[in-house]
Image (cartoon, helix red, strand yellow):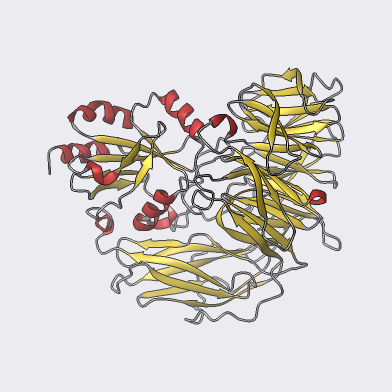
C-alpha cells in the first residue's frame, strides 16, 4: 500500500481500504465473499494471530532461490517529462499487437505508439498529445480497429479515429463528440462504447475510419468498460455491477442480466475458457461464469492485495494491476489444477495502471514506463509485505504487518535483519501459496530509529530481500509538528506556479484532494 | 471545509491550496467546480511532492496525512489524515496571530 491518497485514476474509487492498521482489527482478508477460491484461505497456513512466536535469524542473507522468477522485466522505456522534452505518458491503457510488434497506448500524454520486440527495450515512435492542446491529451482507452487504424476514447471529447499506419505520425481521421467515454469493444460492424454518464453508445463501424453513432442504451450507472463475448456485451458498471446486454438488435442493446459486485467493476477481459475476469477496484478480481451468457454468475473473488485496476489474460494466466504491483494468477495453465492459484507478484517501479498480454508477452503501463515482461514456467514463491514504512510514535510498542506469499510455491522466510532496539517475530517461516503470516515488530522505545532499515530475506527468486524503512518518534506527533515543511513548486489548474517558500509570513493549508 | 477556511481566513492572509496527485486535470477541474472551490488546486502530476511528504511524515500503519498546516515560519503546525476542520482552523488562527 503505497499512499493512501493514490487516486483512482481509472475509476470512481471508493475510499481507499482502511489503512492496514497495526492493531490487528482489520487483518487483511485473504478472500472475498465467495467460495474461498482465491489466493488465501483453503491453501492453509493463514495466521492472523499476533506473531505468536518464531524468531528468525537476525540476518538478511537470502537462501538459494526456489525456482526461477516466473515474471521478469525484459525491456522498458520511460517517457517522463524530463526524457520526453516536457512530454509524459502516464499510461491508462495499452494494446499489444504481437503480429505488428507494436503497442498502442493511451494516457494523459495522449496516444502513443511503440515498437516492441520482446527481449529488447521498446522504442517510442509517434505520439499525439504534446503541446497545450488538451484536445489530444488524456485519452483513456485505445482499441485497434484494423491494421493502421485505431479508436481512442476521451472523457471530455468522445471518440476519435486515428490513422496509425505511419507509426511516427499518427493522424486523426474522424471524431465524434461525447462525454464520459471510457471502454470500447467491437463486434463485427458494431462498436460499443461505455460512457460513465450512464450510457453505452453504439456505433456503426462498417467503415472503421468513420464510426457513426446509431444507438444507445441509457439509464445505466457508471459504465467504465465493455467487452463483447459471443454476441453478448458485458459492461463493467461501477455502480451497478457487471451487466449482460442482449445484442439481438445490435444497435439497441437491452440489459438482460446483472451481477452485483462487492467492488467497483472497472475493466474486463474475457478468456476462451468461458469466464469473464473483472477488475473491481477494492473488490479485487471477480470471475464470472458465462455458461449462461445472458445470466452470468460470479464464481470467485480474489484478493489481489490492492485495488484491481485492469485485467488481462494469456495462456491460462490472468494478470491484474493494482497501481502498486502486477499480480498474476494461474486460472488454467496446462497441467494446473482448476481455479485461481497464485502464480506471481511483482511490485513495479512507478504505478502499475494497465496491462495487456498475448503470446507470453505481458505489456505493463507502469505510469510513465512501458514495461515488457516475460513469463517463465514457475512456480516460485513471491513475497508481499503489507507496508514498507513503519513508524513508532508512542514509545515502546508493537506493530503488526502481514507477509503473504503470492507465488505458486512455498515461501521460506530465512531471516530478518533488524536495527538495534527492534525485535521481530513471525507466526510461521514457511508459507504455502496464498498463505500469510503476521510479522510483529517491537521497538524498545529507547534506541534511536531514524529511517533505519529492516531487511527480510526469503527464497523468492525475484525479490530475495525486502527492505522496510522504520522510524521511531521521540515525542509522538511532535516528530512532525515543528519540522520545516519541504519546499515545492507546482502549477495549478490555470498554469500558475505556486511555491511554498514564497508564502512565508502566512499560514498555509495544504489539502490533499481525491476526486473519487 | 477548506472552502470555508479559505473564504473566512483568506482575506486575513491565510493561504489554502488543494493538491491533486496523479490525476487528470479535467477530473480535478470537474471536481473542484462541483464543490465550488475557489482556492488554487495544484497538480502534482508525477507525485513528487506526494512522495516527499509521505516519506518525511509517514504516520504509523502506512497511512499518511492528508491535511497540513504550515505556520508563517515555514514549519508544520498541524498534520492529520483525519479531517478535523476545527483543528485546521485553530492552526490557521494561531498562524494568523503570529503564534
Residue at position x 29%, y 39% from top? A509
Q: Position of residue A400 (x, y in %)?
A: 46, 63
Q: Is residue A342 visible?
A: yes
Residue at position x 86%, y 63% from top? A335
Q: Quadrant of residue A492?
A: top left
Residue at position x 52%, y 76% from top? A54
Observer-nearest residue: B92 or A413?
Answer: B92
Q: Quadrant of residue B62?
A: bottom left
Residue B55, relative to residue A70: is it above or below?
A: above
Residue B27, relative to residue B68: is it above or below?
A: above
Observer-nearest residue: A211 or B37?
Answer: A211
Residue A394, relative to residue A498: is it above or below?
A: below
Q: Position of residue A216 (x, y in %)?
A: 73, 19
- The reply, left or right, for residue A465 in relation to residue A312 is left
Q: Position of residue A159 (x, y in %)?
A: 68, 27
Residue A168, relative to residue B5: is it above or below?
A: below
Q: Position of residue A222 (x, y in %)?
A: 62, 28
Amino acid at each position: 500500500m503505497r499512499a493512501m491518497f493514490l487516486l483512482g485514476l481509472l475509476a470512481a474509487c471508493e475510499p481507499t481500504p482502511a489503512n492496514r492498521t497495526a492493531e490487528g482489527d482489520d487483518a487483511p482478508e485473504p478472500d472475498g465473499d465467495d467460495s474461498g477460491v482465491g489466493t488465501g484461505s483453503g491453501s492453509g497456513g493463514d495466521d492472523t494471530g499476533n506473531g505468536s512466536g518464531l524468531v528468525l535469524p537476525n540476518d538478511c542473507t537470502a537462501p538459494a532461490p526456489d525456482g526461477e522468477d516466473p515474471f521478469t522485466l525484459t525491456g522498458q522505456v520511460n517517457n517522463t517529462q524530463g526524457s520526453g522534452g516536457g512530454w509524459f505518458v502516464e499510461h491508462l491503457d495499452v494494446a499489444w499487437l504481437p503480429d505488428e510488434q507494436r503497442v498502442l497506448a493511451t494516457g494523459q500524454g495522449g496516444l502513443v505508439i511503440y515498437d516492441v520486440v520482446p527481449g529488447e527495450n521498446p522504442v517510442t515512435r509517434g505520439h499525439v498529445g504534446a503541446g497545450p492542446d488538451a484536445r489530444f491529451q488524456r485519452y483513456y482507452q485505445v482499441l485497434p480497429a484494423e491494421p493502421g487504424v485505431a479508436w481512442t476514447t476521451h472523457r471530455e471529447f468522445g471518440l476519435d479515429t486515428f490513422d496509425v499506419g505511419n507509426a511516427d505520425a499518427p493522424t486523426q481521421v474522424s471524431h465524434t463528440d461525447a462525454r464520459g467515454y471510457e471502454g470500447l469493444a467491437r463486434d463485427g460492424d458494431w462498436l460499443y462504447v461505455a460512457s460513465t454518464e450512464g450510457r453505452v453508445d453504439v456505433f456503426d463501424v462498417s467503415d472503421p475510419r468513420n464510426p457513426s453513432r446509431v444507438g444507445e442504451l441509457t439509464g445505466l450507472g457508471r459504465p467504465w468498460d465493455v467487452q463483447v463475448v459471443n454476441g453478448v456485451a458485458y459492461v463493467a458498471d461501477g455502480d451497478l455491477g457487471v451487466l449482460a446486454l442482449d445484442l439481438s438488435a445490435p444497435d439497441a442493446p437491452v440489459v438482460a442480466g446483472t451481477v452485483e459486485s462487492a467492488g467497483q467493476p472497472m475493466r474486463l477481459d474475457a478468456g476462451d475458457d468461458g469466464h469473464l475476469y473483472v477488475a473491481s477496484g477494492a473488490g479485487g478480481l471477480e470471475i464470472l461464469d458465462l455458461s449462461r451468457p445472458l445470466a452470468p454468475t460470479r464464481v470467485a473473488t480474489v484478493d489481489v492485495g490492492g485495488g484491481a485496476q485492469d485485467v488481462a489474460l494469456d495462456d491460462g494466466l490472468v494478470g491484474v494491476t493494482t497501481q502498486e504491483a502486477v499480480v498474476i494468477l494461474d486460472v488454467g495453465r496446462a497441467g494446473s489444477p482448476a481455479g485461481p492459484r497464485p502464480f506471481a507478484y511483482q511490485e513495479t517501479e512507478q504505478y502499475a495502471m494497465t496491462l495487456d498480454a498475448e503470446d507470453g508477452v505481458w505489456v505493463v503501463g507502469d505510469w510513465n514506463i512501458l514495461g515488457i515482461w516475460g513469463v517463465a514456467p514457475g512456480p516460485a514463491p513471491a513475497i508481499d509485505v503489507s507496508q514498507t514504512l513503519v513508524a513508532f510514535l508512542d514509545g515502546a510498542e508493537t506493530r503488526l504487518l502481514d507477509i503473504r506469499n503470492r507465488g505458486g510455491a512455498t515461501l521460506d522466510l530465512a531471516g530478518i535483519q533488524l536495527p538495534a532496539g527492534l525485535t521481530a517475530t513471525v507466526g510461521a517461516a514457511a508459507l504455502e501459496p496464498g498463505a500469510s503470516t503476521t510479522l510483529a515488530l517491537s521497538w524498545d522505545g529507547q534506541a534511536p530509529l531514524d529511517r533505519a532499515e529492516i531487511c527480510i530475506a526469503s527464497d523468492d527468486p525475484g525479490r530475495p530481500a525486502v527492505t522496510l524503512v522504520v522510524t521511531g518518534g521521540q515525542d509522538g506527533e511532535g516528530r512532525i509538528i515543528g519540522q520545516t515543511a519541504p519546499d515545492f513548486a507546482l502549477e495549478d489548474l490555470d498554469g500558475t506556479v505556486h511555491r511554498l517558500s514564497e508564502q512565508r509570513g502566512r499560514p498555509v493549508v495544504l489539502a490533499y484532494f481525491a476526486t473519487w | 471545509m477548506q472552502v470555508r477556511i479559505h473564504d473566512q481566513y483568506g482575506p486575513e492572509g491565510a493561504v489554502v491550496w488543494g493538491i491533486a496527485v496523479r490525476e487528470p486535470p479535467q477530473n480535478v477541474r470537474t471536481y473542484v467546480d462541483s464543490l465550488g472551490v475557489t482556492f488554487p488546486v495544484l497538480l502534482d502530476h508525477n507525485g513528487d511532492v506526494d512522495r516527499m511528504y509521505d516519506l518525511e511524515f509517514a504516520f504509523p500503519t502506512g497511512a499518511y496525512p492528508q491535511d497540513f498546516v504550515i505556520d508563517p515560519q515555514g514549519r508544520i503546525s498541524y498534520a492529520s489524515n483525519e479531517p478535523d476542520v476545527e483543528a485546521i482552523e485553530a492552526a490557521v488562527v494561531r498562524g494568523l496571530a503570529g503564534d
